[in-house]
Amino acid sequence: MFEIKDLKPRLYQETILATIIKKNTLIVLPTGMGKSIIFLLAAISRLNNFQKSKVLILAPTKPLCSQHQKTIQTHSNIGNVELFTGAVLPLKRKELWEAADVVVATPQTIESDVINERINLEDVSLLVFDECHRAVQNYAYTWISKQYHKKARFPRIIGLTASPGDTLEKIEHVSKNLFIEDVEIRTEDSPDVAPYIQKLDIDLIKLSLPEEFQETRNFLKEALKSKLGIIKELGVVNNTDLTKKDLLNLQASLQGKLIRGEKDFQVMRAISVIAEIIKIEHALELLETQGAYPLYAYLKNLYHEAENTKVKATKNLAADLNFHSAYMKTQNLIKENIEHPKITELKKIIQQEISKNQDIKIMVFNHYRESASFIEKELNKIENVKAKLFVGQAKKADTGLTQKEQVKIIEDFTNNNYNVIVSSSVGEEGLDIPQVDLVIFYEPIPSAIRSIQRRGRTARLEKGRVIVLMTKNTRDEMYYWVSFHKEKRMNELLSKLKERLQGKLEKPQSTLKEFTDEKKLKVFADSREKGSTILKELINLGLSVETKNLDVADYIISERVGIERKDVKDFVNSIIDKRLFSQIKNLKENFSNPLIILEGEEDIYSVRNIHPNAIRGMLATIAISFGIPIIRTKNQLDTAELIKVIAKREQDAESKDIGVRLEKKPLTTKEQQEFIIESLPGIGPSLAKSLLLEFKTVKSLINAEPEKIQKVDKMGPKKTEEIIRILNEFYEKD
């Protein structure tokens, strides 16, 4: 029997466990309230009730997985607790899976193992999704959940988060993707949680933007006003009161028109101007919320880019008089060392706090990595301050941290080697950062999820404080209130969702088809297709997919049918770099019924600067000269559906076993002769055949006099001379 050890569960943890035993449960619990203990209790219950079953716990990062593994090993007598990440070799994971009681893993690792049939979810009695608000769109959580729901003999799902979303649509989306049947919500005010919640003081410090900043701001606003006026004149908007979200949606809508072939000048101009507007908005945000140094770094990089790019939006913006004036004013701010009042206030706060208590632990959150780096440098100028930058994995060589480095920083912070952590969003979720005495928001953020996660870093075991720095009459104020109202609405929506779920979600009845011992359709896929959504969708559609290193084709359906898949961009690129001809030739030589799938809704004639006739010529060659059909699909999901239909047609005979040749068919003597001659410079398939017909053998051609070679049609002196040179040149060792 598995048991818990060295801890006593809290009342709310046991109450939530009672729900988990009965239903798939979404657990919403403040950060630091022992979510890992809840899933540990559930794991012990399921393992004891379902002998020889397994528990699978998924978390988004390797450090968090390691922490969960440690918690289970420390507080239970479960013996085989394995950690699955990309660092463990696939074959080793397959071996470890068989003996494991609990596996803690990153979702991408499990996704890969399920696709390649290294593991089977059938015997998993509990599947835990930590930070489950990520279970949206194409994140691996969504696909794994579907597979588990289909395959598990005794399924149970737990979703854990401090904040699932700020709209009912988002929350319901997560719940649907994880097959949630009930919701357990706890806030700081919940009666059974309140005894364990320490008091949290939140101070809002409002600061005024300096007069010197106002001049730069005015120039940026004038630049913004003029650009908004242009898109209104172009007729793409009726009013210019647009949020960043509005701009991005408008940009996407206009780009969609281009993709559909609507190459209207106004549309193309509007897209370019919107790109300028977004850059100006970003510059304004940096000025108002971060300061002169981050803004200067951004503008300097933009002007450098303008000198070295053909992108019109960047060039036009750099040439804008108001925007350039803002750049010059920002340079003056740097020269005169005029700081944003936030950095001055931040240094003052931290200096005061550390002078009172040198053992204090402080976390400063900043939305921008570059700004966080600047803050770290400024704080380390203060006596007794030991600040450390804490960011995600490398986007830029000077600021990126590996997950190993992140773990080391947290350990050092715990051991008082640092007393201040300056963190980007990476510190908001996932990692088990120790008790923090003071959390400082360098800027408010419009996300309820992120605000909750930031605050959750303090007031765990002892009283905590949060300070929010805000610039008056800027987007700081707007972001603060947006987040406030989103959080309030989220709690109301969760209660509504709980009411809606209770008694209304029933597990769908299994159909007779599910129990039919029908042999699966099988598809072989090239290993390079692993990154596509197609493989996951094919498995969702009930097909068995085996990945192999295929010499020919991306997908093999049968002995007769091999499929080459290309999206529109790759199709055109493969014409330019001449890959396509050899690929279609190999297809035709190896399959009696080859097929090309052309994927995407883009205009094939506009993705690259290539004459349309070159594309038309290749399409005609494929269809007429080689007799290979070309079928267009909208996207990867559509491609998967088509592959399923083809597989069903091909494998619907009495025996569904497909004998698939994974390597190329051996070349005939004739084909090998042609291949040798085609490898010579300037010799294509047609000319190779003409030369072999004239000289009969490869040897005769190689030994022939130049004059005789030139008699063959299309063999000029230069081409002949180059061939003779290649044949007679001495081979040199590297």
Image: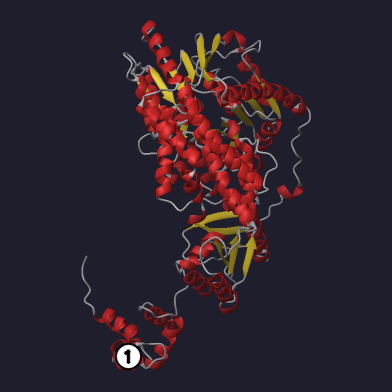
Q: Position of residue 122 (x, y in %)?
A: 60, 41
Q: Tell me: residue 246, above or below residue 435.
A: below
Q: Is residue 147 visible?
A: no
| Residue 171 placement: quadrant | top right
Which residue sits at x=68%, y=39%?
239
The quadrant the N terminus occupies is top right
Badge 1 is on which residue?
A: 700
In front of the other: 721 or 162: 721
- Identify residue type, mark 1: Ser
Is residue 536 found left or right of 235 in the rendered image? left
How far across and how far down the image is residue 315, in percent?
Answer: 47, 48
- The single residue placed furthest to the top in the displayed view is 356
- Callout 1 environment at 10 Å: few (<14), some (14 to 19), or many (20+)? few
Q: Secondary structure at mark 1?
A: helix
* Above or below, comparing residue 211 to residue 631 in the picture: above
Residue at screen point 61% across, 10% down: 194
Q: Residue 111: in sight, yes or no?
A: yes
In terms of depth relative to the viewer, which is nearer, 84 or 155?
A: 84
Residue 685, how many percent across, how many down?
45, 81
Give how far across and how far down residue 240 sits, in percent: 65, 38
Residue visible at 52% across and 31% down in the picture: 218
Question: Is 113 rendered above or below residue 425?
Answer: below
Is residue 573 or residue 112 the one in the foreground?
A: 573
